Image (tube, helix red, strand yellow):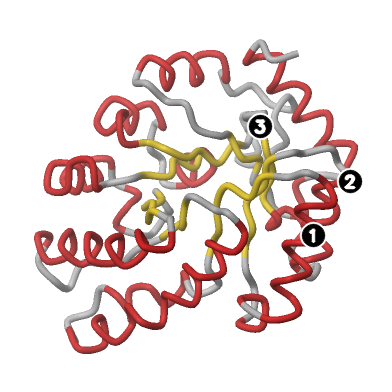
């Protein structure tokens, strides 16, 4: 199945409970949003793996709890901190490897204080650090971060080529006032993971099927660029009622994709 859910939908419930609820909602594909260092190893990581196996889920991607600090750790003008942080991020990559994940979701910097070429080189080095664990670093288009700009993502694509990977998040694009199709036009071949949500004239984050976003157009545009990845429903807890809303959203999206 190409439609999945993020554990962040149930935040601030504990990550293992959130993943269990994804399984109970019938999703076979999931993204895990880690919320504490203890979830990256030991008993809690084993429990996450056990829940994955119990429900027959594929964990396709992981999201770190350190997104708020990625500017400080990775993209500041104090280069030694970046070099040291590569070892720090290996804890996330190892947890992702244990779960079988493919993508590590990165928010990136809130502003540029280093040269764009240096930013691209650091992103490449982080991705090279992730590769031995079987993961790729995928840069998300988050509002108030440098990745909200399609032109900046296009620059990274131009610098890194096939070593650039992007997560397209629909609600983040809306909040930045950017047409999500502009990302597809400029970096379409390197969009490899998608966070799905719906919207209407008044609300920018709704369960798919509850708004007016043209999902058929989105799927066709991505498929024309060769997209074969997953579509992860990522909402905030206040955006839906219960698991039934998420189950209905999955069913709606599968219908649009022609998977029913």
Image quadrant holding the N terminus, namely: top right
Location of residue 46 in the rendering, given as x and y in whole percent from the top left corner: 73, 71
Position of 101 with respect to 207 (left or right) is left
Depth check: give the residue in front, 3 or 42: 42
Location of residue 113 in the rendering, given as x and y in whole percent from the top left corner: 17, 73
Look at 68% across and 23% down and name the residue there.
Answer: 253
Depth check: give the residue in front, 119 or 31: 31
Rendered position, 260 above or below 230: above
- What distance separates the C-alpha of mark 1 from that of mark 3? 17 Å
Which residue is denoted by mark 1 in the rendering?
18
Secondary structure beneath disc 3? strand
Look at 43% across and 18% down and name the residue there.
Answer: 223
- What distance separates the C-alpha of mark 2 from that of mark 3? 15 Å
Location of residue 220 in the rendering, given as x and y in whole percent from the top left corner: 47, 13
Rendered position, 235 above or below 134: above
Which residue is denoted by mark 3 in the rendering?
3
Q: Residues within 10 Å of mark 2 (few under 14, many from 20)?
A: few
Which residue is denoted by mark 2 in the rendering?
24
Depth check: give the residue in front, 218 or 19: 19
Secondary structure beneath disc 2? helix
- What distance separates the C-alpha of mark 2 from that of mark 1? 10 Å
Q: Residues within 10 Å of mark 1 (few under 14, many from 20)?
A: many
Location of residue 63 in the rendering, given as x and y in whole percent from the top left corner: 54, 61
Rendered position, 7 above or below 24: below
Depth check: give the residue in front, 1 or 212: 1
Quarter of the image for residue 150 reads: top left
Query: In this orientation, does residue 6 appear?
Result: yes
Tell which circle, 2 or 1, labels the residue nearer the N-terminal end. Answer: 1
């Amino acid at each position: 199945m190409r439609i999945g859910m993020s554990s962040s939908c149930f935040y601030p419930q504990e990550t293992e409970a959130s993943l269990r609820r994804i399984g109970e909602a019938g999703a076979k594909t999931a993204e895990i949003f880690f919320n504490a260092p203890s979830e990256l190893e030991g008993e809690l990581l084993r429990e996450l793996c056990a829940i994955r196996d119990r429900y027959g889920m594929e964990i396709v991607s992981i999201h770190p709890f350190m997104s708020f600090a990625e500017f400080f750790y990775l993209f500041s003008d104090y280069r030694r901190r970046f070099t040291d942080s590569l070892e720090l991020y290996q804890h996330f990559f190892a947890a992702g490897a244990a779960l079988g994940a493919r993508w590590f979701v990165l928010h990136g910097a809130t502003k540029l204080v280093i040269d764009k070429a240096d930013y691209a080189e650091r992103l490449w080095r982080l991705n090279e650090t992730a590769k031995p664990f079987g993961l790729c670093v995928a840069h998300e288009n988050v509002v108030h971060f440098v990745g909200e700009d399609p032109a900046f993502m296009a620059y990274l694509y131009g610098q890194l080529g096939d070593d650039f990977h992007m997560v397209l998040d629909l609600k983040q694009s809306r909040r930045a006032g950017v047409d999500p199709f502009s990302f597809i036009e400029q970096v379409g071949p390197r969009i490899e993971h998608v966070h799905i949500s719906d919207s209407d004239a008044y609300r920018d984050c709704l369960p798919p099927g509850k708004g007016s976003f043209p999902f058929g157009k989105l799927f066709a545009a991505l498929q024309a660029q060769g997209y074969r990845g997953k579509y992860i429903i990522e909402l905030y807890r206040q955006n839906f009622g219960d698991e039934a809303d998420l189950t209905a959203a999955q069913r709606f999206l599968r219908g649009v994709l022609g998977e029913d």
